[in-house]
Image (cartoon, rainbow, N blue to C red):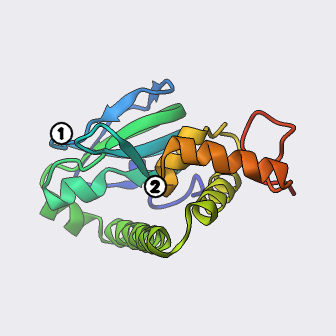
C-alpha cells in the first residue's frame, strides 16, 4: 500500500483514529473472548492470530504484516474475538474506532469493499489450509508451512513450535520431520533458523 493510497487510516471518515503506538515482541493487542471497540492498521511489524483450545493448545490461525488491517471482522460482526492477537516482531499499530458501524460503512464505501476483498482472501486461505489438513500427511504439511512462512516472512526466525501451530501438528512431530528434511538436504542444516534450501 503506497503512501497515497485512499485506504490509509488518515483517509477514513466518521471514525476516531489513534496515534501510532509501538509494541514489543510478545505483546498482546487483544485477547480471545474480549469484546472489540476498534480495529487495527499495522504500520510495520508482524502480528499473529492465535486460537486457544480448552486444553491450552494454541493454533496459529493467521499472520498480518505492514500495511494490513486486522480485527475488523469481529467488530463488524458484533461478536467477541475468536483469537488473540500477539506481536511477533516489534510493531507500530494504529487503532480505528468506527463508532456507529452503519454510518462508518456508508461514509467509507470504497474502503468497505477493500475490507471485503481482504476478508475474502483470508477465507480462501483458511479453506485451503483446512483442506490440506484433511488430505495431506504431516510431512507434506510441515514442508508447505516452512516454505510458506519463510518465503512470506523471511525476516522472522520461525521456530518448530510456530510451524507446528501453523500446520496443525504437535511440536515434536515438527522437530522430527524437520530433522529428517535436514538429512535429506531439503532444509538448510547450516543455519539455526528453518529455511528451505535454494
Residue 176, position as x, y percentages in the image: 65, 45
Residue drawn at x 65%, y 53% as measured from the top left: 146
- Secondary element at image label 2: loop
Towards the viewer: 105 or 141 = 141
Please give the count of numbered marks on the rendered protein: 2
Q: CA distance from mark 2 to mark 1?
A: 24 Å
Mark seen at residue 34: 1
Left or right? Give the position of 13 relative to 27: left
| Residue 183 at x, y percent in the picture | 83, 49
**Is residue 98 at least partly visible in the picture?**
yes
The answer, for residue 44, to whether it is visible in the render is no
Q: Residue at x 22, y 65 (%)?
A: 105
The quarter in which the C terminus is drawn is: bottom right
Q: Nearer the viewer, mark 2 or mark 1?
A: 2
Front residue of 97 and 164: 164
Question: Quick one: label 2, few (<14), some, or many (20+) residues within 10 Å?
Answer: many
Residue 140, horizontal then vertical, whole percent? 63, 65
Relative to 148, residue 124 above or below:
below
Are the residues tagged 2 and 1 within 8 Å (C-beta)? no
Looking at the image, residue 177 sits to the left or right of residue 163; the answer is: right
> Which is nearer the N-term, disc 2 or disc 1?
1
**Quadrant into which the N terminus falls:** bottom right
* Residue at x 29%, y 55% (from the top left corner): 72
> Quarter of the image holding residue 21?
top left
The residue that mark 2 highlights is 168
Left or right of residue 163, residue 50 in this image? left
Q: Left or right: 65 with respect to 82?
A: right
4 or 133, which is in the foreground? 133
Amino acid at each position: 500500500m503506497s503512501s497515497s493510497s485512499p485506504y490509509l487510516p488518515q483517509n477514513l471518515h466518521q471514525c476516531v483514529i489513534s496515534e501510532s503506538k509501538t509494541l514489543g515482541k510478545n505483546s498482546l493487542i487483544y485477547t480471545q473472548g474480549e469484546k472489540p471497540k476498534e480495529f487495527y492498521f499495522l504500520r510495520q511489524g508482524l502480528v499473529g492470530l492465535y486460537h486457544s483450545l480448552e486444553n491450552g493448545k494454541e493454533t496459529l490461525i493467521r499472520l498480518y504484516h505492514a500495511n494490513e488491517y486486522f480485527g475488523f471482522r469481529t467488530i463488524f460482526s458484533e461478536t467477541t474475538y475468536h483469537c488473540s492477537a500477539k506481536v511477533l516482531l516489534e510493531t507500530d499499530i494504529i487503532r480505528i474506532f468506527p463508532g456507529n458501524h452503519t454510518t462508518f460503512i456508508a461514509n467509507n464505501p470504497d474502503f468497505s469493499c477493500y475490507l471485503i476483498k481482504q476478508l475474502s482472501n483470508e477465507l480462501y486461505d483458511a479453506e485451503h489450509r483446512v483442506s490440506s489438513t484433511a488430505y495431506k500427511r504431516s510431512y507434506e504439511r510441515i514442508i508447505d508451512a516452512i516454505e510458506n512462512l519463510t518465503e512470506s516472512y523471511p525476516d522472522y526466525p520461525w521456530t518448530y513450535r510456530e510451524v507446528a501451530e501453523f500446520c496443525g501438528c504437535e511440536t515434536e512431530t515438527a522437530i522430527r520431520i524437520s530433522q529428517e528434511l535436514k538429512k535429506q538436504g531439503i532444509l538448510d542444516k547450516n543455519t539455526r533458523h528453518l529455511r528451505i534450501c535454494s
